[in-house]
């Protein structure tokens, strides 16, 4: 990556979400709380899924991996954004900017494929229940998770290959709270028309194909349940409606920002909040708080760790130190 040879820009200036001091203080508190909730909520899901034997199933294995991706996705830029709310000069180094571009496409690309994998899991469970155990084996689940990371890695490396060697000689102001690829590309000191075409094609193929697979899977599930019973249809609609809400909030901004060719809008940086912050906080709510098994498992864990310990339950070494 010989990116410094043709670039005189050593850092970029991030304008953030607002220039108002009052709003920045509000945003600092608001997003700090959101970030803590995202990390703790998704960590709780990971701990619950891994520690409760009743949740060692394909659906919850994929859910635990989704929570891990959500923590990563919320952490690539949010902590810096929060710190920048208290800073007058919001800058990021050239290498830091490239790192943000790398991680955002790695995590979002991986999450797209992971959401498709979760939809496939529900498809097999509802449409082919007798074959579920065979089809969704541990080997299959591991393969699906590996594919999601591999697709994310290929996607982000291909995006970087278009931009990492672009010459940046000024200006260096990015109208966002992180290094958003379309905005950074427009700062290059050359005609970026061809690069933008490649970015649109790359992001468009991944986001539109995965979104189409999700839509098809949900349609098949609805059609299958439709012919079973009205009660099953109502239950499936209640569950899938929440999932579809998350999918729309995640894919909608991504498609608008990265597939809409050559044009950036002021609303883009607000839409980016949906897939970098709001989706990671919605996933724990949508996929767990509406799930009875998860709630029961969480209650058991909370009860075990929070209730007063009896003397007989305290390890012998600790008991001896008490006397």
Image (cartoon, rainbow, N blue to C red):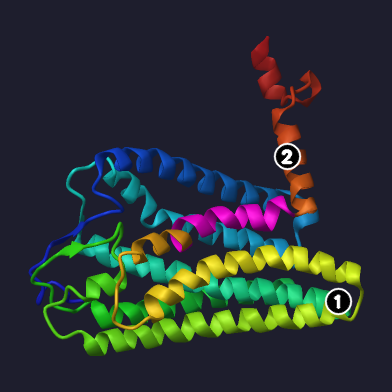
Dot 1 falls on a residue whose secondary structure is helix
Residue stretch rendered in magenta on the structure: 275-290
Name the residue at 38% across, 77% down: 258
Q: Which mark is residue 129?
A: 1
Q: Residue at x 30, y 65 (%)?
A: 266
- Residue 135 seen from this side: no
Which x, y percent locates residue 271?
41, 64
On whether residue 289 falls in the magenta region, the answer is yes
| Quadrant (top left/top right/bottom left/bottom right) for the C terminus | top right
Relative horizontal placement of residue 126, taking residue 252 as reference (left or right): right
Farthest residue toward the right?
Answer: 229
Q: Pick the residue in front: 62 or 323.
A: 62
Question: What is the x, y in percent for residue 91?
Answer: 19, 53
Q: Tag 1: Cα neighbours inside 10 Å, few (<14), some, or many (≥20)?
A: few
Q: Is residue 289 left or right of residue 18?
A: right
The residue positioned farthest toward the top in the image shown: 323
* Quadrant location, the N terminus: bottom left
**Alpha carbons under labels 1 and 2: distance apart:** 30 Å
| Residue 319 image position (x, y, % from top left) | 70, 18
Magenta region includes residue 317: no
Please name the residue that numbered disc 2 is placed on. Answer: 301
Q: Secondary structure at mark 2?
A: helix
Q: In front here: 245 or 86?
A: 245
């Amino acid at each position: 990556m010989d990116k410094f040879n043709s670039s005189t820009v050593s850092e970029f200036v991030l304008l953030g979400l607002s220039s108002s001091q009052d709003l920045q203080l509000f945003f600092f508190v608001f997003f700090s709380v959101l970030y803590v909730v995202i990390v703790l909520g998704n960590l709780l899901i990971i701990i619950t899924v891994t520690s409760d034997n009743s949740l060692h199933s394909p659906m919850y294995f994929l859910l635990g991996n989704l929570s891990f991706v959500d923590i990563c996705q919320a952490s690539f830029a949010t902590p810096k954004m929060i710190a920048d709310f208290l800073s007058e000069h919001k800058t990021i180094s050239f290498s830091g900017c490239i790192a943000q571009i790398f991680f955002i496409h790695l995590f979002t690309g991986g999450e797209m494929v992971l959401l498709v994998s979760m939809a496939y899991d529900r498809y097999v469970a509802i449409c082919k229940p007798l074959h579920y155990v065979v089809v969704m084996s541990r080997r299959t689940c591991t393969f699906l998770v590996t594919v999601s990371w591999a697709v994310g890695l290929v996607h982000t490396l291909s995006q970087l290959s278009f931009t990492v060697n672009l010459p940046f000689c000024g200006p260096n102001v990015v109208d966002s709270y992180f290094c958003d690829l379309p905005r950074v590309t427009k700062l290059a000191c050359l005609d970026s028309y061809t690069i933008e075409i490649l970015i649109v094609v790359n992001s468009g193929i991944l986001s539109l194909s995965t979104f189409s697979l999700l839509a098809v899977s949900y349609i098949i599930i609805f059609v299958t349940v439709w012919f079973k019973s009205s009660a099953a249809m109502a239950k499936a609609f209640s569950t899938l409606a929440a999932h579809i809400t998350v999918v729309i909030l995640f894919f909608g901004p991504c498609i608008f920002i990265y597939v809409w060719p050559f044009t950036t809008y002021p609303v883009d940086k607000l839409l980016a909040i949906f897939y970098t912050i709001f989706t990671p906080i919605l996933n724990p709510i949508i996929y767990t708080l509406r799930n009875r098994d998860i709630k029961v498992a969480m209650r058991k864990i909370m009860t075990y760790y929070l209730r007063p310990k009896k003397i007989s339950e305290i390890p012998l070494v600790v008991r001896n130190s008490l006397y």
